[in-house]
Amino acid sequence: MKTIRIGSLEKPVSRMGLGTWAIGGGSAWGGDKDHDDSIATIRTAPTLGVNLIDTAPGYNFGSSERLVGEALKGMKREEVAIITKFGVVWDRKGSLFNKVNGRQLYWNLSRESILEEIDRSLERLGVDYIDVYMSHWQSVEPYFTPISETMEVLNELKAQGKIRAIGAANVSPAQVEEYLKWGDLDIVQAKYSVLDRAVEDELLPICKEHGIALQAYSPLEMGLLTGTLPRDYKPVGAQIPKKWFQPENLPKVFDYLDRLKPLTEKYQCSIADINMAWILAQDEKVILLSGAITADQIRQNTRSTEIDLSAEDVALIRDMAEELDR
């Protein structure tokens, strides 16, 4: 497994991380997942070289963090790097986010909220420090908190040893610049797939400039780019409102996937592997999140980190993907 360095973390991290939003279950993923399968998936990841585990309190109201914490009881803590997040809350007020199962979620990045969240996350995870603490979304009115104030408390948590590195998800280039004014920003998380390349305009260049790792979430577009869905597939949960799951777009995506089949034969891999390997080929500081929900899935997904696409094939895949927007 290829690795990179994130900030001042002592351990190098794998270029593929295990994302546990789906494992957390809930209505966003069509219901809860099998408990034993979820624990086995998390515990299998490090044995395959995947030592980065990504979670968040907002993944089904703490369920994902609790599952990761349960899995960690049967693992060596020093062998994994844990990312969890802050800023999405449901038990205190903030700026309106959305509703899940009738429960209102809020955005809150205030000092008081972060100090409550960090202790609850540490408790759910059953650990005494978090490798990367990441803002899940950025602050908006009417409960707006300047990045300078958020970074002040994060720097304090880092000095106390409760966190080791700082990250920011769903962030604009201007916000990245603001974070950097007040301390180290080690990793940025953003949606990035063959079908959604918006980060390439400004965000990825600014990350390259400052040596910030970019963690690509949803590289398989919630399963659409795996090549395993039937053409008559009906989206569920969080897939329903997404652009590429719309009836007018799905046929075009399936045609694109069919055109990838010669490359799967060339590289002896799956369609999912090709789509993830393409993301990794964009820069050595880009890492993937795999939303696997079974041990077999994470085992299969690690294949993408072993594929070295030729420059010609990287360009070919880009051309094919760009045609879908024309």
Image: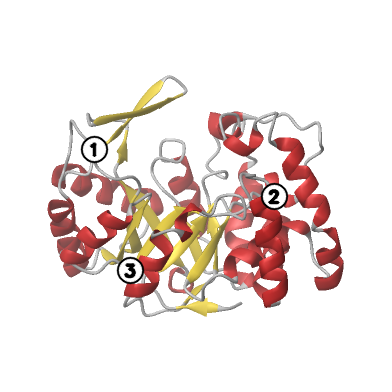
Which one is in front, 288 or 23?
288
Q: Which mark is residue 186?
A: 3
- Whichever of labels 1 and 3 marks the residue nearer the N terminus, that label is 1
- The correct choice, above or below, for 180 with respect to 85 in the image is below
Q: CA distance from mark 1 to mark 3?
A: 22 Å
Residue type, numbered disc 1? Val
- Whichever of labels 3 and 2 marks the residue nearer the N terminus, that label is 3
Residue type, numbered disc 2? Leu
Q: Are marks 1 and 3 in contact (CB under 8 Å)?
A: no
Where does residue 322 sit, x and y in percent of width and height? 64, 53
Which residue matches tag 1? 140
The C terminus - image quarter: top right
**Could you say whether the residue bearing mark 2 is in a helix, strand or loop?**
helix
Where does residue 135 sit, x and y in percent of width and height? 31, 51
Residue type, numbered disc 3? Asp
- Whichever of labels 2 and 1 marks the residue nearer the N terminus, that label is 1
- The correct choice, above or below, for 187 with respect to 58 in the image is below
Where does residue 272 sit, x and y in percent of width and height? 72, 57
Q: Is residue 39 left or right of residue 264?
A: left
